[in-house]
Image: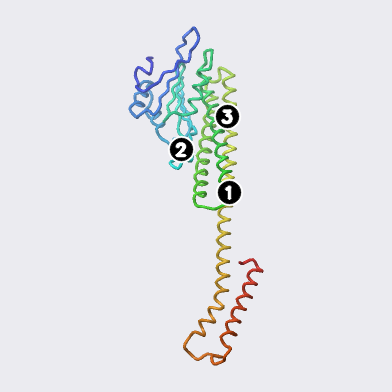
């Protein structure tokens, strides 16, 4: 079979064999390929185009397809990006992995830290790594990046919690909604990655070397830990949002209670003044001390109302 780089443009070939012997193993990276390049890739390996076009779907779930000595994985990788306001947003993107006997092909939307870390580990190897080792490294890198991003999300949750102690704003609420959405995506991605990793362990080529299988098993444990952390942080966000809504409702209730109390207090002298301001016959209107007595009584009643409301913590 010809090298894929000779038939598909935009493919980066990374030799894996580093010793005196050349075993012909290589890793091919394809970053942000278009539909035409993926069709060429499918024709090169004589596979259905759907295998590779699924990688372009941002909502594609983790899966494993196995045909003969060829396995095609779709995983979900974490991605942190900067928003226009300088804050960070969290999402997951598909990562396609094609595994053959002597070739490994990765397909990504863009440069991913997960793939870069595997490449760095490969460059540090002095021997002749196996393709199975690369698959194990991909799962290990996925687990580590999920855990790293989750710690970053936890710091954001703590920052929002501290801000809510001082003020309540719509911006804080929408930030919590954004983090909750990210955690939901992480939970779904981790669940799919764990299932796919467990299926990879059952592949015949992965059962040849026990060390590689153990590395994938360790990665599964880390992925499960990341999923538990995701569920925990998701529950924390939910409780924080419930507390936020409760505080807002309590503040609104207190504000309305204060406004209502002062309205009653002010209404007492205003009512007396309004009644005796009408141009109609009224009691005591001819009495010389009517004005000071009536106004004094009104302000006395207002003072008693203020004392009553203040005693009951209404104002």
Q: How many residues crowd around disc 2 within 10 Å: few (fewer than 14), some, or many (20 or more)?
A: few
Disc 1 target residue: 240
Of mark 3 and mark 1, the one earlier in the sequence is 3
Q: Distance between the residues labelled 1 and 2?
A: 24 Å
Q: Where is residue 276 in the image (x, y as percent from the top left)?
A: 52, 85
User: Does dot 1 land on a helix, a strand or a loop?
Assistant: helix
Label 2 SS:
strand
Q: In this view, does 301 lie above or below 81?
A: below
Residue placed farthest to the top in the image?
Answer: 20
Spatial CA span between label 3 and label 1: 30 Å
To which residue does mark 3 refer? 220
Residue drawn at (52%, 37%) of the image: 186
Q: Which of marks 3 and 1 is in front?
A: 1
Q: Residue at x 52, y 81 (%)?
A: 273
Foreground: disc 1 or disc 2? 2
Residue 74 percent location from the top left of the image: 46, 30
Q: Mark 2 points at which residue?
A: 82
Mark 3 or 2: in front is 2
């Amino acid at each position: 079979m010809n090298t894929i780089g000779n038939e598909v443009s935009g493919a980066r070939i990374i030799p894996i064999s580093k010793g005196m012997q050349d075993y012909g193993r290589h890793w091919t990276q394809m970053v942000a390929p278009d539909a035409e390049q993926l069709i060429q890739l499918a024709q090169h390996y004589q596979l259905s185009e759907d295998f590779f076009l699924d990688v372009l779907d941002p909502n594609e779930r983790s899966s494993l397809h196995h045909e003969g000595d060829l396995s095609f994985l779709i995983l979900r990788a974490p991605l942190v990006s900067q928003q226009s306001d300088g804050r960070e947003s969290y999402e997951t993107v598909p990562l396609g992995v094609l595994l053959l006997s002597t070739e490994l092909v990765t397909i990504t939307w863009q440069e991913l830290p997960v793939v870069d870390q595997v490449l760095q580990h490969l460059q540090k190897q002095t021997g002749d790594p196996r393709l199975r080792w690369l698959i194990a490294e991909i799962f290990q890198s996925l687990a580590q990046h999920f855990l790293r991003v989750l710690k970053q999300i936890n710091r954001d949750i703590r920052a929002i919690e501290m801000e809510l102690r001082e003020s309540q704003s719509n911006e804080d609420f929408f930030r919590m909604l954004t983090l909750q959405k990210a955690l939901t995506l992480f939970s779904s991605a981790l669940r799919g990655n764990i299932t796919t990793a467990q299926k990879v362990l059952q592949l015949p080529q992965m059962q040849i070397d026990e060390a590689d299988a153990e590395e994938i098993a360790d990665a599964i444990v880390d992925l499960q830990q990341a999923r538990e952390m995701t569920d925990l942080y998701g529950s924390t966000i939910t409780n924080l949002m419930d507390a936020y809504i409760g505080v807002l409702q309590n503040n609104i209730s207190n504000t309305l209670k204060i406004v209502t109390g002062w309205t009653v207090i002010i209404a007492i002298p205003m009512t007396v003044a309004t009644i005796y301001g009408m141009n109609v016959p009224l009691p005591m209107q001819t009495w010389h001390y009517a004005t000071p007595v009536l106004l004094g009584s009104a302000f006395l009643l207002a003072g008693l109302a203020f004392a009553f409301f203040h005693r009951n913590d209404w104002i």
